[in-house]
Amino acid sequence: MNSCLHKLILTSVFITLLSIEPCLSVRVYKKTDILRLREEVREMFQHAYDSYLRYAYPYDELRPLSCDGVDTWGSYSLTLIDALDTLAIMGNYTEFNRVVDIVLQKKNFDADINVSVFETNIRIIGGLLSAHLLSHKTGTKLEPGWPCNGPLLRLAEDVAQRLIAAFDTTTGMPYGTINLRAGVPPGETSVTCTAGVGTFIIEFGTLSRLTGDPIYEEVAYNALKALYHHKSPIGLVGNHVDVMTGRWTAQDAGIGGGVDSYYEYLVKGAILFEKPELMSMFIEARQAIEKYLKKDDWFVWATMLRGHVTLPVFQSLESYWPGVLSLIGESDTAMRIIHNYHSVWRQYGFTPEVYNLGTGEASSSRESYPLRPELIESIMYLYRDTRDPILLQMGEDILRSIQHSARTPCGYATIKDVRDHRQEDRMESFFLAETTKYLYLLFDPDNFIHNPGVHGTVINTPNGECIVDLGGYVFNTEAHPIDPSMLYCCHEAKHGINISEVHRIYQILEEEDNIKFMTMIEASKEKVINDTTAIIEPKEAVNISEPDFKNEISEKLDQNQVLIKTETRTGYVNIDGTEREKTKNESLVDIVKERINSYYNNTNSLEQKEDSTTSLEENTSSTEYENKFDVDDIIVPQHSQDIEPLQTPSGNRAREVFKMLPKVIQDFLNSDWKAREKCEPQHLLDRIRKEKRYPDHSDTKRYELLLTPAPSFLQRISLAGEFLNKKQLEM
Ligand SMILES: *[C@@H]1O[C@H](CO)[C@@H](O)[C@H](O)[C@H]1NC(C)=O
Ligand SMILES: *[C@@H]1O[C@H](CO)[C@@H](O)[C@H](O)[C@H]1NC(C)=O
Ligand SMILES: *[C@@H]1O[C@H](CO)[C@@H](O)[C@H](O)[C@H]1NC(C)=O
Ligand SMILES: *[C@@H]1O[C@H](CO)[C@@H](O)[C@H](O)[C@H]1NC(C)=O
Ligand SMILES: *[C@@H]1O[C@H](CO)[C@@H](O)[C@H](O)[C@H]1NC(C)=O
Ligand SMILES: *[C@@H]1O[C@H](CO)[C@@H](O)[C@H](O)[C@H]1NC(C)=O
Ligand SMILES: *[C@@H]1O[C@H](CO)[C@@H](O)[C@H](O)[C@H]1NC(C)=O
Ligand SMILES: *[C@@H]1O[C@H](CO)[C@@H](O)[C@H](O)[C@H]1NC(C)=O
């Protein structure tokens, strides 16, 4: 987790930078040694977690010295939500499920509190999304349509909808603070830090891919482009920016606090969403960083306009950088850097918030260690890639320090001063979300998170079969893992219904064509039973729910049937299961439109049956479908003037039709997602699209940029043939 630090106040003189050589004699780690360390980390987590539950819940954070709780970031039981997926990663499924139930007692996040947009996004939305995606492993009861649907996902979306108003600015960069109920507070400053602008694409993109609502990804992407657009001529970004004017109010450029996760999300966003232009933006930024900020494998702060060094310091937060480098296949460079950082750890037993490279000492007034995860995070990544045992030793050093100096009878305490290891009465939620998680993962090489693509799980979704859990997890900046294959499941399934199409069809159902559509289906069924139409002339009545139609009849029925893909077919199939020709390049929505037209062409001459006895208000609980399908949810007549002569189909008949749909579609239509209100700030999205304030980066198609020599744990998707499709690879 990285944070929006206030402008650095240090102004020490630039002196020759230190380069401390590591002089470790590396221990030998046997498998049993590693697992013993893992169990020690589990106990560490358990102690802190149980203490939070006992002394602090439902407050945001535990106070480990006074043994009570306190609200810090938003009065939303922050630590509970932030720690949730760590339970799943450590395999404590019963507790995970218990907490999910608790979290779900909350229907939404409506509250009159001012919260940090950045922190709420990475901790709450990130935590909820990750728990949602992991819940298939833990035996949680899944809703139909999962992972594209589910209560945790809806909760995450509820939070995101509350944050989105922050993006309604002239630059598209978000405000830093928002009131969860009322939007941007009056008089709120328009100045925010760079990370607070550029750290949304993972959570918001995930939301969009899962729900099908593009607004989240587009506002997050727009904010990233805004930062890129406002970079200095030498390619650096500053620390704080005015979101209404685009003016930089703090012009220090660096890779640490206030900027950090912007760079992190360029790389991770490129990987997770297959966006080469984000990788290009990172590569360009990296060139400027190497040129102006990198000194002997340390990174300093400099003016964004000229690159003059202002602060020769190392910040604890910067330790994420080697981890990011390992993601792009530069573990060698990363190892050199992490040796530097670890030398600071060994000097004090912790890394101070700010370490002066000139004097080789912790900077006064910035000498605390609030149990931050960044160093252990990079160590975990690098170990996974290199298996260098020195990384295990670094991890054990960190474990020892924390156990020795931070442990209290009721939790783990922030180190107030790394020089004397005094404690402070605070345990931030990232200790349970990140620090313990990365430590655990370092010592648990067989954890499912590390799966290099050698096995997966087949699940059935509304859009067909989908292989998930193949590894390649991308962590958000609060260590909440996202399974990329699940985004793919909901976004565009190769085998089965394209969920975007289903959403579009649903819009048809909801809007002008809905009556046409339902009437058509309904009437076609009526005709079969009735033997009165010109299109279908069966000799006898047919039991419509019987799957084995007589051939003759099914052939005729076909004309008026909606064509749907099922999870077992590669192409579109008719309702009766016969396959439709695959030669045509057609989307589901086109097929539906064609069916509608064909129906009207064929029935124009027919008298339309008036059926005044049916109405949507009829007693729906009188059928066997009660609680399963409320026709009002699907049929919402809105433009009835266009189609005067037609009647809305009755609830009963719509139900019959519904029954004809494949089970997987029934489940999908039954689930809650369709009842979701349209995101209110739709106008914001429209405006972003209309204005097109920032041009697209020219590298949107350079997929080869994603083919970095990344370690195998990221290549798993390409192994599965899903990460980059053939066409992209051939480019
Ligand atoms: C799971 O967590 C609960 C609550 O902290 C704890 O009581 C239980 O022992 C844990 N179970 C396992 C298997 O670790
Ligand atoms: C939120 O911030 C606004 C503006 O600073 C302030 O007027 C309001 O009282 C704050 N609300 C809460 C609940 O703190
Ligand atoms: C799914 O539908 C969307 C929207 O129509 C389209 O952009 C996307 O390419 C489709 N995906 C596939 C795999 O057909
Ligand atoms: C058959 O259609 C006629 C009108 O065309 C209607 O009055 C009658 O109720 C229908 N029969 C059945 C069994 O639905
Ligand atoms: C349709 O046929 C099936 C199997 O023959 C039977 O179980 C079902 O009750 C029938 N439904 C109706 C509405 O007649
Ligand atoms: C096939 O569909 C795609 C997406 O709708 C479209 O761009 C393309 O032109 C179509 N190809 C043909 C041959 O119709
Ligand atoms: C319906 O009729 C219109 C006009 O006569 C024609 O353009 C269209 O192709 C027809 N559609 C179908 C599906 O037959
Ligand atoms: C619906 O039908 C059930 C059973 O026939 C009955 O108990 C209930 O009162 C009815 N509800 C309405 C709103 O008519």
Image (spheres, rainbow, N blue to C red):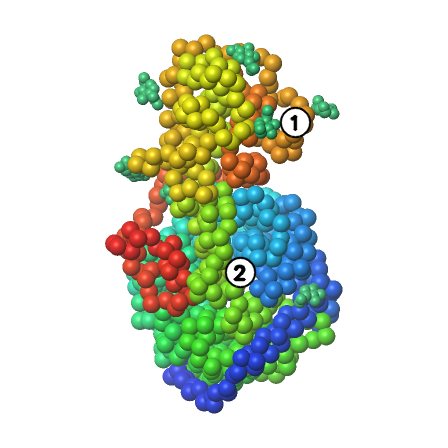
Residue 288 seen in the figure = no
Circle on res. 623: 1
Residue 103 in picture, x, y percent from top left = 65, 52
Looking at the rendered structure, the secondary structure element under dot 2 is: loop
Residue 676 in picture, x, y percent from top left = 55, 38
| Left or right relative to 701: residue 31 | right
The answer to whether 403 is drawn above or below residue 45 in the figure is below
Quadrant hosting residue 621: top right
Taking depth in this image into account, of 481 and 287 the one nearest to the observer is 481
Circle on res. 480: 2
Image quarter for ligand 1 equals: bottom right
Residue 147 in picture, x, y percent from top left = 52, 48
Circle on res. 489: none
The answer to whether 661 is drawn above or below residue 395 in the figure is above
Mark before the other along the chain sequence, 1 or 2: 2
What amino acid is labelled 2 in the image?
His
What amino acid is labelled 1 in the image?
Thr
Kindly report which numbered mark, 1 or 2, lies closer to the viewer in this rendering: 1
The answer to whether 403 is drawn above or below residue 436 in the figure is below
